[in-house]
Image (spheres, rainbow, N blue to C red):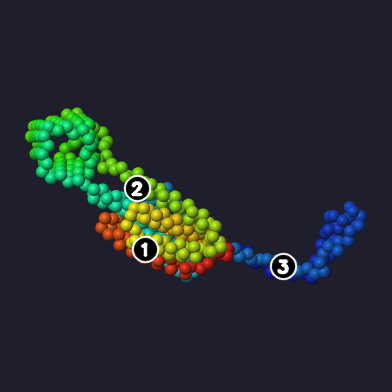
């Protein structure tokens, strides 16, 4: 670089004179000197010459461009992958900086607690209703012990029955449905099964002698430890056949649909009162009310009560979800917002997997543990949410 030129400052009178002469020659002489140039200049002018310019320091490029001649393709891929991983880890670590540390910690707790309870109960509600239906169905089972039936034509369907140590001699089972029927230690001799459709039906430790099965779906796996003596299977039904079809399966889908539909009023209410009440109160209040809904499950012993509490829980928790997403946007600056959403959503998915697995494993065993887990998580998340700063007046960066 050449030697820097020193700054020179001329007097105001000299500068005004020079400017006046130049403007008169270029512009004002053709107009006959009608304008007075001195009226358009300030009384004093100070001109400085800048010799050094300080450029802003830019961040170094995080990506490294590798020429095709550098190393092998695997090495180039490894370098690019390592560089990308370092960039991701650096962005994640920036969420734990001094100004964002507590916000990230609080939001992580709130996201985890809400997802753990919401998705866990979303799986638990339909499974619990299905379990109650199964218990009610089992309570109505009919048991037949040591019955002997000869030369009889079964032209009616059999459902939810258990036959133990029975004897069926020269009987015909034609064009009927066997639903949830179990034959134990029974004898079938000179019988005929024709056009049979079965669901959840088994033959266990039975003796089947000189019996014909024609156009049935009674396959080999439905005969458990049975003794076959001159039994014939002709034209068995083929294709996809669901062995566990239940009439109440439609109710399970209806329960899930009602839970999804209950979210709509929660979304409308949260949208109307988000600015009036505040994000923090919406989140904390919704989570605490949802915790109360889960605690009321201890008092629910019927399917209708569980469905009603499910709809109430889904509607209230929808407001909490909306508030959580709004606060997450407003707490983080634009440069950290996408990273924060990615990390918190990953934590949310982990909590959803844990909640679904844990809650589903206790169906049919006890309902106290899922209820207490969801209640504790929602209370903890709601109390932490009340500690968040109010972001209603905050200007997004």
Q: Which residue is mark 3?
A: 48
Residue that badge 1 annotates? 295
Disc sitting over residue 252 in the figure: 2
Closer to the observer: label 3 or label 1?
Answer: 1
* Foreground pick, 227 / 78: 227
Residue drawn at x 45%, y 53% as measured from the top left: 263
In the depicted structure, whether residue 305 falls above or below residue 197: below
Tell me: residue 391, above or below residue 71. below
Q: Secondary structure at mark 3?
A: loop
Task: Give the answer, above or below, for where 330 lies relative to 210.
Answer: below
Seen from this angle, which residue lies furthest top?
235
On the image, the x and y values in percent for residue 83 come to: 42, 57
Pinpoint residue 337: horizontal percent, then vertical percent: 49, 59
Q: Quadrant of the C terminus?
A: bottom right
Residue 244, numbered label: none
What count of labels does the image hold?
3
Q: Mark 3 and mark 1: span between their CA atoms?
A: 77 Å
Q: Would you call the spot at circle 1 few (<14 residues within 10 Å), some (14-19), or many (20 or more)?
A: some
Q: Position of residue 163 (x, y in %)?
A: 15, 43
Q: State the residue at coordinates (12%, 37%).
A: 149
**Residue 16 as seen in the image, left or right of residue 90:** right
The residue mark sitting in front, 3 or 2, is: 2
Quadrant location, the N terminus? bottom right
| Lateral position of residue 391 relative to residue 117, left or right | right
Res 210 → quadrant = top left
Position in image of residue 213 (x %, y %): 16, 32
Residue 41 visible from this viewpoint:
yes
């Amino acid at each position: 670089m050449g030697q820097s030129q020193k700054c020179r400052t001329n007097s105001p009178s000299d500068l005004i004179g020079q400017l006046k002469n130049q403007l008169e020659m270029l512009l004002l002489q053709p107009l006959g000197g009608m304008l007075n140039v001195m009226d358009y200049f300030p009384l004093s002018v100070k001109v400085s010459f800048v010799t050094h310019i300080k450029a802003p320091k830019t961040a170094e490029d995080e990506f490294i461009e590798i020429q095709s001649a550098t190393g092998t393709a695997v090495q180039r891929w490894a370098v690019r992958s390592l560089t990308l991983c370092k960039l991701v880890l650096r962005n994640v670590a920036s969420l734990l900086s001094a100004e964002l540390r507590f916000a990230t910690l609080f939001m992580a707790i709130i996201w985890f607690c809400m997802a753990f309870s919401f998705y866990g109960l979303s799986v638990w509600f339909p499974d619990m209703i299905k379990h109650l239906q199964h218990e009610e169905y089992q309570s109505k089972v009919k048991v037949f012990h040591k019955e002997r039936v000869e030369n009889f034509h079964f032209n009616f369907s059999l459902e939810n029955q258990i036959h133990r140590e029975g004897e069926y001699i020269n009987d015909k089972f034609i064009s009927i449905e066997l639903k949830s029927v179990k034959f134990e230690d029974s004898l079938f001799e000179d019988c005929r099964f024709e056009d049979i459709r079965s669901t959840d039906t088994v033959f266990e430790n039975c003796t089947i002698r000189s019996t014909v099965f024609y156009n049935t779906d009674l396959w080999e796996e439905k005969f458990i430890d049975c003794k076959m003596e001159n039994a014939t299977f002709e034209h068995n039904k083929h294709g996809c056949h669901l062995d566990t079809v239940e009439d109440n399966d439609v109710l399970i889908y209806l329960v899930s649909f009602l839970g999804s539909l209950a979210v709509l009023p929660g979304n409308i209410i949260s949208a109307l009162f988000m600015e009036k009440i505040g994000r923090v109160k919406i989140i904390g209040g919704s989570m605490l009310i949802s915790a109360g809904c889960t605690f009321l499950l201890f008092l629910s012993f019927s399917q209708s009560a569980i469905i009603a509490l499910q709809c109430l829980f889904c509607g209230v928790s929808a407001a909490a979800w909306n508030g959580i997403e709004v606060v997450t946007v407003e707490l983080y600056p634009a440069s950290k917002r996408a990273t924060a959403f990615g990390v918190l959503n990953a934590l949310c998915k982990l909590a959803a997997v844990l909640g679904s697995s844990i809650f589903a494993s206790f169906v049919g065993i006890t309902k106290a543990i899922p209820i207490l887990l969801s209640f504790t998580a929602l209370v903890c998340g709601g109390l932490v949410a009340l500690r968040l700063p109010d972001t209603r007046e905050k200007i997004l960066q």
